[in-house]
Amino acid sequence: MAEFKEISPNAPAGEKLLNWVDNRFPLTKLWNDQWGQYYAPKNFNFWYIFGSLAMLVLVIQIVTGIFLVMHYKPDAALAFASVEYIMRDVPWGWLIRYMHSTGASAFFIVVYLHMFRGLIYGSYRKPRELIWIFGCAIFLCLMAEAFMGYLLPWGQMSYWGAQVIVNLFSAIPFVGPDLALLIRGDYVVSDATLNRFFSFHVIAVPLVLLGLVVAHLIALHEVGSNNPDGIEIKAKRGPDGHPLDGIPSHPYYTVHDIFGVVVFLTIFSAVIFFAPEAGGYFLEYNNFIPADSLKTPNHIAPVWYFTPYYSMLRAITGEMMYALIACVIAAAVFGVWKARVAAIFKAVIVIVAVGVAAMMLSIDAKFWGVVVMGGAVIILFFLPWLDHSPVRSIRYRPSWHWYLYGLFVINFVVLAYLGVQPPSPMGERVSQVGTLFYFGFFLLMPWWSRIGEFKPVPERVTFHAH
C-alpha cells in the first residue's frame, strides 16, 4: 500500500483537499512536471505564443462544436435548414456558429505562424524530430477535420467543393474510382457522404487529433523547448540542477501567455462581432445558398487555408509535366555527379529517374496534380533531414537566408491568393513558378542550407531584461 503524505490538521480546507487528491492521484506532480516547474528558455519572444493559442482555439472549437451538434441535423434534406435554425432561433446560436467558423480560420492562422516559427528557429532539428513529426501529423489531421466539417452546412460551395476534392481521388490509377466511391458512399456527394463526413468530423478525427496533441506535448517536455538562439539550455546547469538560462513556466510564461490570449481574444471577438464572414474568406457567400446538385457555381474554390495547395493542384497541366520531367532528369544528373557511391547505385538512380519520367508521360496530369498537392504537405515531415545547416536558428545564418525565407512566405501567400481566384493564363503561369519554388525550397535545402558565412553561436542564450 502506498504511503500517504500527512498534512497539519490546522491547514486550510483547500490544502487538505489537494493533499487528499495528491495521495490518490499525482495532480500536483503532473502540474509541476508539465508546467509549474517545467524550465523553459528565458529568451522566448513573440513567436512562442502561438502554441498556447493553438491549444486555446482547439478548446473553443471543441466546446462550440458540442453545442452546434445539439441542434444540427446530419441529413441532406435538413442540414441547411438546421444551420439556419441555429442562426435564427437557438438562443445565442449565431454567436456559437460564428465562433466555430471564425475559430476554424483562427486555428489555421495560429498553426501556420507556429510552424513558421519552428522553420526559422530550427525547432525540427535533433533532438526534436518527433515533436516536428507529431506537429505535421496534427496539421494533416486538422486539414482533414476542416475539409469534412466544410461539407456540413450543406451550402452550394460546401457541396461543390466536396464534389471537386473527392473526385480528385478518382485520378489515382487502378483504385481511384473505387476509392472515390468509398469516400462518398455514393456516385455523387449525397446524404451518405454527409453522414460519413459528420461522423468523422465529430468523433473519429477529433480523437486522433487529441491523441496527437498529447504526443506532441509529451515529446516537447521530454527533450525541452527550443529557443530563438537554437541553443540547448540543459548543457549549462546551476548548483540546483536547473538550467542557468531557464525559468519556471509558472508564473513567468503563464503571464506571458495570458497577455497573448487577451490580445488574441480581442481580435477574435472583433472579427466575430463585426466581420464574421471576413469578406467571404471565412464564410463564403455561396454557402448561404442551399446545395443544388443541378446548379454549379461559376467558380469553385476551397476555403482560404487550403488555397496554396489548391493552386499547386491547378498548376499541374500537360505543359507543366514537361517542366517537371526536366526537373527529375536534372535531379538525377546532379545526384549521379555528386553522389559518392558505387557505380551500380548511380545506375539505379538513372533507371529510377527514367522510370519516373516515363510514368509522368503516360499517366494523366490530373493524377500528378493530386500527388503534388499531397506532396506539398508530406514534404514537411522530412524537414529535419533536409536541413543540413551547421546552426539551428536563422539568427546565426547568412543574411541572404532571411531573404530566401521571406520569398518563401511571399510565394506561399501568392499561391493562396491565386487559389481563390478564377483560373487565368497569367495566374496559371505564376502558380507554376510558385509550385516549383515551393518544392525547390525544400528539395534543394540540403545544398543551400550549408552555403554562406555563418555567425558564431554563443554558449548561452542572448537575453535582454525588460
Image (cartoon, rainbow, N blue to C red):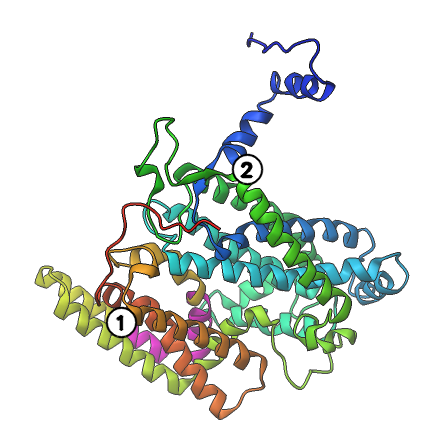
Q: Give the x, y percent position of residue 51.
A: 53, 51
Residue lying at the far right of the rendered structure: 89
Q: Give the x, y percent position of residue 16.
A: 69, 16
Q: Is residue 364 magenta?
A: yes
Three-letter residue code for mark 1: Gly
Q: Give the x, y percent position of residue 287.
A: 74, 73
Does residue 175 sit above or below 42 in this rendering?
Answer: below
**Direction from residue 314 to residue 228 in the image, left or right:** left
Three-letter residue code for mark 2: His
- What whole-number distance in Å separates the C-alpha atoms at marks 1 and 2? 57 Å
Let me know if residue 174 appears in the view. Answer: yes
Label 2 Cα crowd, 10 Å radius (few <14 / some 14-19 / many 20+): some
Q: Residue at x 74, y 81 (%)?
A: 294
**Direction from residue 75 to residue 15 in the image, left or right:** left
**Helix, strand or loop for the magenta stretch, by majority:** helix
**Is the residue under label 2 in contact with that under label 1 (CB below 8 Å)?**
no
Q: Residue at x 35, y 72 (%)?
A: 404
- Which residue does the numbered mark 1 point to in the structure image? 355
Q: Is residue 298 magenta?
A: no
Residue lying at the far front of the rendered structure: 466
Q: Give the x, y percent position of residue 228.
A: 39, 54
